[in-house]
Amino acid sequence: MSLKAFHLIFVTLLISLAFGCAAWAFNNGRPGWGVAAIATGILVILYGVYFLKKLKKISYL
Amino acid sequence: MDIPYTVHNRPDTGIYNAKLGIWLFLASEVMLFGGLFSAYVLLRAGAEPGMWPHGWLDVRLGTINTLLLALSAITTLLAWAACKVREFGKFKFFHGCTILLALTFLGIKSYEYHDKFIHYEIALNDGTFVDGHLKEKSADFDLKKKTGTVTLHGRVVQDRKELMDLRMPAAQAAVLEEHVIQAADIKKMQNYGPWHNTFTAIYFTMTGLHALHILGGTLVIFYLWGPGSRMWKTDPERFTNRIEVSGLFWHFVDLVWIFLFPVMYLT
């Protein structure tokens, strides 16, 4: 598995963490944190799309 | 004699040798951290009701550290991508950013540790507890001889259980004041180091081991960024593979933090 594939796994987990943190924040009465976490999650998704386009030619192995 | 398969893939494994080596190493690391996460689950499940701490760690600092490591994973990948397209200047810039982000992470972690080491819980002879940060110890303070005073900035509670969940409204609303305590009134005095309870023990063990991995990874990345980058002139493909291998290790360390952060700071 190349760094590209591992980075993809990392980005996927980071997105899960961001939305998980948002759920935690809303449950714990911190709506501002929740919105920030959702915004971070969306930013990471956008980064993931950019990274996949940028490294299109590099192998996953 | 050259070391075989440092650049080209080995026919039987399909990858170059260093990549196989780092994946075997990471497999052993998964077992190491997996064992510690299992220990955490067992300690937490086995804790007496109401005696597992909540809200003892600063979520803001944990969040900043999470963002720093996430950014460092991105800069590591971009440094490798820069090597792939033969842009050495960009590689230097991105890996320099990785080093700075890692050092900032370690600085914040050190601050968190320091905060725990100056945080004390004092059991008094009258059965109450004073909990707070150490402000001052008188020159003649000696717990064994029962002389002198110690000053804490914190609060007094009647039951130790009140100190366990700092997310509760009562704990949030508590007014912190300075308390001057006579050594003669102290039954037991202990800071929030690894010896304090099972939570601090597993917290320091897991985050300490993780921080050591960050330190080790930073040293390797610094070597590749500095003196080790001379290889770029003689064997750029092999150098690029070295960057990939160090990047795989760095991603693993970041991945561990993605699990550590919610487990330690949010639950």
Image: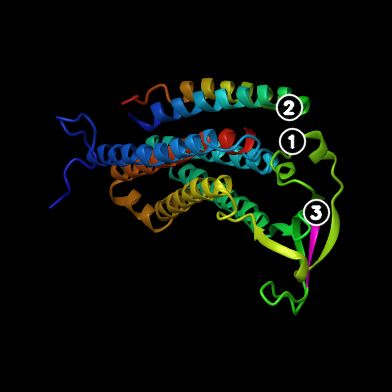
Q: Are marks 1 and 3 in contact (CB under 8 Å)?
A: no
Label 2 sits on what residue type? Answer: Asn
- Using the image, name the chain to which the residue with label 1 belongs: B
Disc 2 is placed on an element classified as: loop
Q: How is the image coloured?
A: rainbow
**Cα–Cα span, label 2 and label 1:** 9 Å
Q: Which residue is mark 1?
A: B167
Q: Is residue B251 visible?
A: no
The residue at the point 73 percent across, 74 percent down is: B146
Label 1 sits on what residue type? Answer: Arg
- Using the image, name the chain to which the residue with label 2 belongs: A
Q: How many numbered marks, from 0 up?
A: 3
Q: Residue furthest front?
A: B126
Question: Are the residues flagged by discs 2 and 1 from a single subunit?
Answer: no
The residue at the point 64 percent across, 33 percent down is: B266
Residue B160 x %, y %: 71, 47
- In which image quadrant can residue B14 be found? top left
Q: Main secondary structure of the magenta part?
A: strand
Q: Is residue B153 magenta?
A: yes
Looking at the rendering, the stretch of residues picked out in magenta corresponds to B149-155
Q: From the viewer's perspective, is A12 left or right of B110?
A: left
Q: Which residue is mark 2?
A: A28
The residue at the point 75 percent across, 76 percent down is: B147
Question: Are the residues flagged by discs 1 and 3 from a single subunit?
Answer: yes
Name the residue nearer the viewer: B159 or A28.
B159
Disc 3 is placed on an element classified as: strand
